[in-house]
Image (spheres, coloured by chain):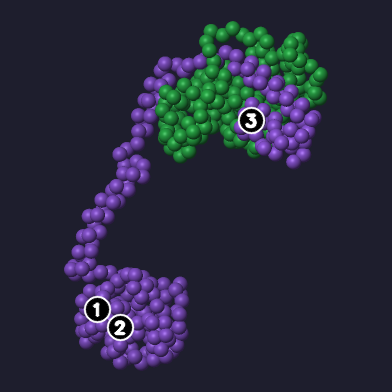
Chain colours: A green, B purple
Amino acid sequence: MHALALPFNIAIDPPRMRSSAAQTCVAVPDFSQLVADHYTGLHRFAQSLCRRQGLAEDLVQQTFLQWARKGQTLRDTSKAKTWLYTTLYREWLGIARREQKHEQVEFEPDLHGAADEPAEEPRVDAATLQQALEQLDENYRAPLVLFYLRELSYRDIAETLGVPIGTVMSRLSRAKDALRKLLLQSGQLPPSES
Amino acid sequence: MNRDEAQRLLDATTLRPQDGDAEARALAETDPVLKQWLAQRTAFDERVAEAFGAIPAPARAPQDLLRAMQAEAAKVRPSPLKGPWPWLALAAMLLLTVYPATLLFNAFGPQANDWQGEALAKVMLIQKGVMRLEHEAPRIETLRPLLAQVGALSPGDMPSVLLRTKTFGCRVIQVAGQPATVICFDIGSGEEAHLVVMNHSHARQLPSQAQPLLASRDGWSTASWTDGTRHYMLVTTAGAKKLMKLLA
């Protein structure tokens, strides 16, 4: 695999390094800890939604400011992470509605090829993945991005996006199939392990 | 659970097996097709997640974000009386200061304790039909044995007019945590009067029946007296004149 050279280290899965006891801690997380834990993940999610760097930063900052105003009212502090992602998503929906750029388009498999299993495994690198994700409809991109962030369970994803759990599972399954097709169509060679 | 259902559940948890469904995982262990599909899907998801983590994103928040959050929080900082504890403390303080004062006031003050107010509130409910009579009989002499059967207070000496007045019935109510008896009278013209009989231990000192304490309260005329062992309160909305006639 050819990973992009990055100027900094990214914690791919910070929450998995925390214990479950920490996640259910009743103390309200302090601002610096909260920002350190979730800034990057929220930014990736925001970027995948709006595809604009500046707007993504604004969305994330707005989300944290909302937390500063209202976070103390959250009764179940173990839900802070879900609260942040949900708030960011709602902020985005509000912006998208105003900009009339958010279209509720149902997934059309024909746009992304049939869902038959291909014989070969697609190559996956950051640049190709980003291009492929941008081709997905937002209804499928949003749960998929949250899934690959590994921050939230599928139940939390459903709560964040305000859709039923069954819908999230269906969208994840179909979005993964579509993503796989798109990655294959990118014309790159299969990885060495397949 | 069939293979399709298990596949959907497993597909949603490939990267977080801790969220997985035990039944679906067990099925994947016994179904070779499902097992192979899960292995391939998990491998694909792991590679995508790794590549997703490599998409450039800021590793740290801007320096001024924390300051902005602190400033935002300061704007909405709760007042000293926000949240349950300050209010609970205030309530406790009031309880510690006002309640003893109330006890003293009730014991020695001009109003004595307000058993009459509590009794009157329940009489209102009886008159409105909200609280039903437990026994119905046209004469008080018929009601006495019924009250005695349940160990309820029965009136002793009564004004002679009241003694002859037709009754609707009676019921036992709780006043100041003690049982009291209410006897309802039909005083004509569609109007009623009610006699509350209560043990004297929870009432202030009252005059005798010969000189009852008359009062008016919330549209009700009341007359209160004691016979030494019981306290009585006769009430009606028919007015003080009719009340006085009943006391003759």
* A123 to B89, vertically: above or below: above
Q: Is mark 1 on a helix, strand or loop?
A: strand
Q: Which of label 1 and label 3 is nearer to you?
A: 3
Q: What is the three-letter code of the residue carrying label 1?
A: Leu
**Looking at the image, is mark 2 or mark 3 earlier in the sequence?**
3
Same chain, marks 2 and 3? yes
Q: What is the three-letter code of the residue carrying label 3?
A: Pro
Decide if residue A68 is in sight here. yes
Residue at the spot of label 3: B17
- The residue sitting at 64% across, 13% down in the picture is A126
Q: What is the three-letter code of the residue carrying label 2?
A: Leu
Point out residue A28 in the picture as x, y percentages from the top left corner.
Answer: 42, 33
**Looking at the image, is mark 1 or mark 3 earlier in the sequence?**
3
**Looking at the image, is mark 2 or mark 1 earlier in the sequence?**
1
Q: Determine whether, in the image, residue B147 is placed left or right of residue B226.
A: right
Residue at the spot of label 2: B243
- The residue sitting at 63% across, 17% down in the picture is B50
Point out residue B35 in the picture as x, y percentages from the top left corner.
Answer: 75, 29
Residue at the spot of label 1: B214
Q: Which of label 2 and label 3 is nearer to you?
A: 3
Decide if residue B189 is in sight here. no
For the residues labelled 2 and 3, the Cα–Cα distance comes to 81 Å
Asked if marks 2 and 1 touch (Cβ < 8 Å), the reply is: yes
For the residues labelled 1 and 3, the Cα–Cα distance comes to 80 Å
Chain letter for the residue marked with disc 2 in the picture: B
Mark 2 nearby-residue class (10 Å; few <14, some 14–19, many ≥20) = many
* B64 to B220, vertically: above or below: above
Q: Report the quarter where the C terminus of chain B lies.
A: bottom left
